[in-house]
Amino acid sequence: MCIRDRVAAKAGFVCTASEDGHVKFWKKMQRGVEFVKHFHAHVGPIADVAASFDGLWLATTGGDGAAKLYDVASFDMACILRTKKMAEPYVPGCVAWLQTEARPAPRVAVCDATEAAAVRVYGAPAFEECARVRVHPAAPVVALCFLDALDLCVSADARGVLEYWRAPVTTGGVDDEGRVAAIEETAADLPTDVVAFKRKVDTDLYALAKAKVAPCRVAGSRDGSKFAVTCADATVRLFDTRTGKLVRTLDERVDSLDAKRSQWRDRIKAHEEEAAKAADASSSDSSS
């Protein structure tokens, strides 16, 4: 069984989400964790799970066509969004909270798992849609990460193309006659205030697409200066956020790890042989 987890240090909880659709809350204690509550949240595998910046909210999505919000303080389910029953139905996939210290209002971004559709942004706790951002026009988003230190989203589509973008504060609301205004789809703009390049061709954000490698997950460092992409070829690629350059590739393939172990064994053996020779030479000198 595959288990994903999310930790919110500020709220002091751990959430685990399993492939069979179960979500469990655990309270961090001085020693270990203590089980608190369990939800059979989704019918089938959970697509993604994300905790908000302040640790007060949790979001999960599943292939059953549901996205759910949880109030961490009370360990209760706050709202359910049935995406397959909407006027424009879709299957929810990647999810991330768009929340910073400067903008503490809880907003959550939800991506379409099957089509190259705009990323939908909702306000918590009622799943009120407030924005739509067109990020990847050619393939569905398969990985999403929000770097709260930079107020920056990093996303990857099924082709391996990485994008930087920032969601608008809001494009919805209520018009002068009290009717809910239509959500206008906006194009994703490159946040030039946090990057050191003007064109993506000057970066390595197409490196995965060129290598024809599918991304699996994206995760960022606490200060937002670096982010990592785990890939289907059992590699982890580290990027510098500001320059968009590939810093390092970690090869986690079995044959590569075996080769590294063999190299280490050879080096240790050579070191032991040198130490033995030195010891023999020392004993010979002392006896003579």
Image: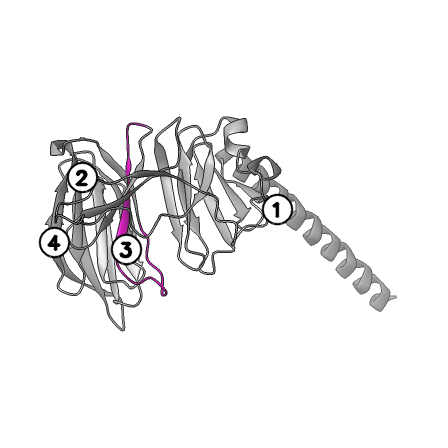
On residue 264, the disc is 1
* Measured Cα–Cα span from mark 1 to mark 4: 50 Å
Point out residue 180 in the picture as x, y percentages from the top left corner.
Answer: 15, 45
| Residue beneath the point at 37% across and 65% down | 102
User: Is the magenta region chiefly helix, strand or loop?
Assistant: loop
Sequence order check, earlier mark of 2 and 3: 2
Neighbours of disc 3 within 10 Å: few (<14), some (14-19), many (20+): many
| Picture layout, residue 117 above or below residue 154 | above
Q: Write down the residue under mark 2.
A: 20
Task: Identify residue type, mark 1.
Answer: Trp
Sequence order check, earlier mark of 2 and 1: 2
Q: Secondary structure at mark 2?
A: loop
For the residues bearing labels 3 and 4, Cβ distance under 8 angstroms: no
Residue bounds of the magenta highlight: 97-115
Q: Write down the residue under mark 4.
A: 77
Task: Identify residue type, mark 4.
Answer: Met
* Measured Cα–Cα span from mark 2 to mark 3: 20 Å
Q: Is residue 283 left or right of residue 32?
A: right
